[in-house]
Structures are given as structure tokens and as C-alpha cells.
Image (cartoon, rainbow, N blue to C red):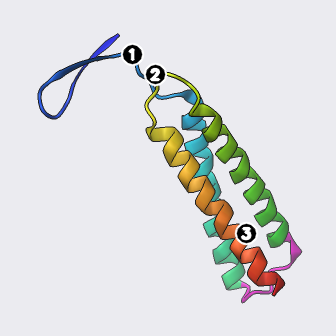
Amino acid sequence: MRIRIGRRRKIQFTDKKHPRQGIVSTVMAVASFASMCALFVGSGRAKGNAGLSYGYLGILNMIFSAVGFVVAFRCFKQDEIYLTTPTTGAVVNGLIIITYLILYILGVL
């Protein structure tokens, strides 16, 4: 049990901790976002003619982000945890998945 002193100078006794799965999900989200930005920059430099390898890497990155989303979602079932890291991981991974889905749908049209 830790004693935590908040901003208002009141003492809180808590056993909460940041879950390992939430931290992993957030790290996966940051890595997936960095990879997505790198793919966007590389495709932009190639003026849209980057080839299939960028598409395959994008699909793998979307799958990686989906795994991070599932890891974050499973973390919400635990008790006595801080919800900051799982929420961050779920939101960022979800936004990345939506971005890739929109990009692929627009590419088909």
C-alpha cells in the first residue's frame, strides 16, 4: 500500500498500479503511430508509387495496432488499476485502425 499525496494536499491510500498490459498496449500504439508516419512520408516521397511493399507493411501495421487494441481492451477487466495507460493504448490504436481502414477504402474507390 502506498500513500499518495495529491494536488490538494490530501492523503490517499491506494493499492492501484499501472497494469503491464496497458503499458505494452501504449508502447505498441506509439510504435504503430511512428511506423504509420514513416510509411506516409515514404509514400509521399515516392509520389504515391511506392509499390506493394508499403501496402503490405501498412496491413501488418494495422494488424499490430489491432493486437494492441485487444491487449488494452482485456486490461479493462482487471481490478485496482489506473486506467490511464489502457485508455491511451485503446484510443490511439483504435484511431490508427480507423485511419488505415479509411485509407484502404479510399484506395479501392
Nearer the observer, 89 or 45: 89
What's the residue at 65%, 69% (across, down)? 99
Q: Quadrant of the N terminus?
A: top left
| Label 1: element kind | loop
| Residue type at numbered disc 2 | Glu
Q: Decide which of tag 1 and tag 2 comes sooner along the chain.
A: 1
In 3D space, how far apart are the residues under numbered discs 1 and 2 (Cα atoms)?
A: 7 Å
Classify 68 as above or below 19.
below
Q: Decide which of tag 3 and tag 2 comes sooner along the chain.
A: 2
Observer able to see residue 30: no
Q: Which mark is residue 80?
A: 2
In 3D space, how far apart are the residues under numbered discs 3 and 1 (Cα atoms)?
A: 39 Å
| Residue type at numbered disc 3 | Leu
In 3D space, how far apart are the residues under numbered discs 3 and 2 (Cα atoms)?
A: 34 Å
What's the residue at 57%, 48% (across, down)? 90
Q: Which mark is residue 15?
A: 1
Residue pushed farthest right?
Answer: 52
**108 sits to left or right of 6:** right
| Label 2: element kind | loop
Q: Which residues are magenta?
A: 46-53
Classify 7 as above or below 98.
above
Q: Which mark is residue 101?
A: 3
| Residue type at numbered disc 1 | Asp
**34 sits to left or right of 16:** right
Tag 1 and tag 2, C-beta contact below 8 Å? yes
The verdict on residue 106 being magenta is no
What's the residue at 71%, 79% (across, down)? 43
Q: Decide which of tag 3 and tag 1 comes sooner along the chain.
A: 1
Give the main secondary structure, helix, strand or loop, of the magenta stretch.
Answer: loop
- Where, by quadrant of the figure, is residue 103 drawn? bottom right
Residue 30 rendering spot, x and y as whole percentages: 56, 52
